[in-house]
Amino acid sequence: MSINNFFRDLGSGITSVFKGQTKEDNLFELNGRTPLLKAIPFGIQHVLAMFAANVTPIIIVFSAIGLYGTSFATYAMSGALFMAGIGTIIQLLIGARLPIVIGTSFTFVPILINIGLKAGGGSDAYYTIMGAIIVGGLIAAFLSIFYRFWGKIIKPIVPAIVVLAIGFSLLSSGASQFMGGANVIKALIETGTTPNNVPYYAYILVAFATLISAILWQLFVKGVWKNIYIFIGIAVGYIISICIPNMVDFSILKIDTANLLGPKGIFSFPKFLDFTQLKFDGTSIALTTICFIIAIVEAIGDISALTSAGLSREPTKREYIGTLIFDGLNSSFGALFGALPLTTFAQNVGIVAQTKVVNRFTIFTGALFLVIVSLFPPIANFIYTIPDAVIGGTMVILFGSIAIIGMKEISQIGFSDKNILILSITTCLGFGLSIASISTNNGVHFITEIFDKIGVGWLGELLSNCVLNMFIISIILSWVLPDSMHISFLHKKKNKENNNNQ
């Protein structure tokens, strides 16, 4: 592509989001503007689905390396929100040019904890992790440039199975949120009571109220507004939870009046990390790069599901390459603000599948909302007060729909003998191994324990990822097994013998 064609393509990708007459029907079209009164609520609905999940990996990793509650974690959360917004805008205008939303990936959590603990925790762990993300993201972006070559080894059944795997991987998260969330469930098991002594049944009632409100809205409201049922369900669930004493913790909304310009004040700008402290460890970079390759696989499945559900077609090579390159670059750039790797969020694929809202201008308004929220901590903190049970009331719809999209894609490809065999083996070994467990003292998944015993616990963490397992198994079987499921030379020999006998 010449330089002129490159900039012409770049310009058309940006202008196509905003050009043309503003129309309500554009909500269901990729390009064109929609009225702001429609774009804003539908756009915010998209980002609300990923808001809490965007910082959860940071909480987990920074807690493990002893930095949660420090300025490192505070600025990492601010940077993650900021880059989620900026990264989404980049994907909408330059990268994939699809209605995808970027957020902090859970895929990297086990490996980053492993890297951090090996580095001794604290600030050394922080700068080792950030160094690995910066380099790993650049490597992933470089590899993605050549997707048109290595992408040929991925047969149609593989992305469909990856979509199914992504749906499977989210089911437990959606179910646990519906049941109150990890913190509530953990407190109930360990202490026999929930935080602030809120009756446990109240969380279940709130989750059901959220779910029922979303369903009723979709059933009885006509026109485009029926598709905002996720937003309505969350709003109703949140109002009910506020009415239950101590369920919503408002202490996080307290503003430090002595420091209004800061992460605990009114305005805060993401802060660059100290570049002179960055550490580039070869082993850490290699492990992080492996995680980026897994993230590439997940992104392939995500955009395949998104275009199938929202646009009724397969992604183009340009859309694949744009998504993958900028997922890597967004992660590397985000690490400069202390953020963990940012990739395409599967949660938002579920929203597209349910609402059919694919308009880039609409998602653009949601991305701007993320950027604004990252600059004003009180707004972000208000959204963080939404209980997990409320989010879970809608996630059970969205997460389940991703698995259904995978099933639909597989059915469209066809249930040939070969595909049935691939699906059977990948489901049992790929997904089965990721959830298989035995009774242990600490309740850790046995695959992780086995590899930990032989000194390669990081490998066990990788193999406990059902998306990676199902991808590897399906891609191997798609090439090893014959399309006709018959060994041709044996059948030729048998036919020859039959002809001779005749």
Image (tube, grey):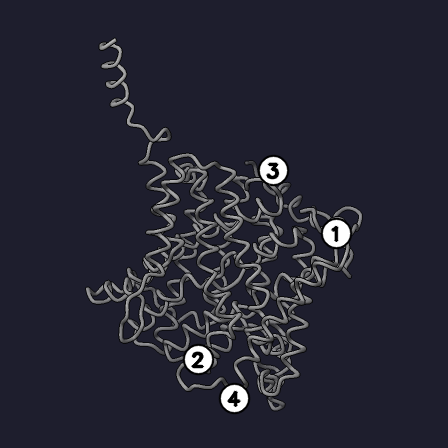
Mark 4 vs mark 3: in front: 4
Mark 2 vs mark 3: in front: 2
- Disc 1 designates what residue? 33
Place of residue 474 in the rendered image (x, y in percent of width and height, measured from the top left): 37, 44
Residue type of the residue flagged with mark 4 = Asn
For residue 115, the mark is: none
Q: Label 4's element? A: helix
Using the numbered discs, state the Cα–Cα distance from disc 4 to disc 2 in whole angstroms.
25 Å
Within 10 Å of disc 4 (Cα), the crowding (few <14, some 14-19, many 20+) is: few
Mark 2 vs 3: CB contact within 8 A: no
Q: Name the foreground residue: 292 vs 281.
A: 292
Q: Name the foreground residue: 134 vs 85.
A: 85
For residue 197, the mark is: 4
- Disc 3 designates what residue? 5
Q: Say if 447 sits above or below 359 in the image.
A: below
Mark 4 vs 3: CB contact within 8 A: no
Furthest-left residue in this view: 454
Q: Label 3's element? A: helix
Q: Which of marks 1 and 4 is nearer the N terminus?
A: 1
Using the numbered discs, state the Cα–Cα distance from disc 2 to disc 1 in whole angstroms.
41 Å
For residue 68, the mark is: 2
Within 10 Å of disc 3 (Cα), the crowding (few <14, some 14-19, many 20+) is: few
Residue type of the residue flagged with mark 1 = Arg
Place of residue 133 in the rendered image (x, y in percent of width and height, measured from the top left): 41, 62
Instruction: Classify residue 429 as left or right of residue 178.
Output: left
Q: Which of marks 2 and 3 is nearer the N terminus?
A: 3
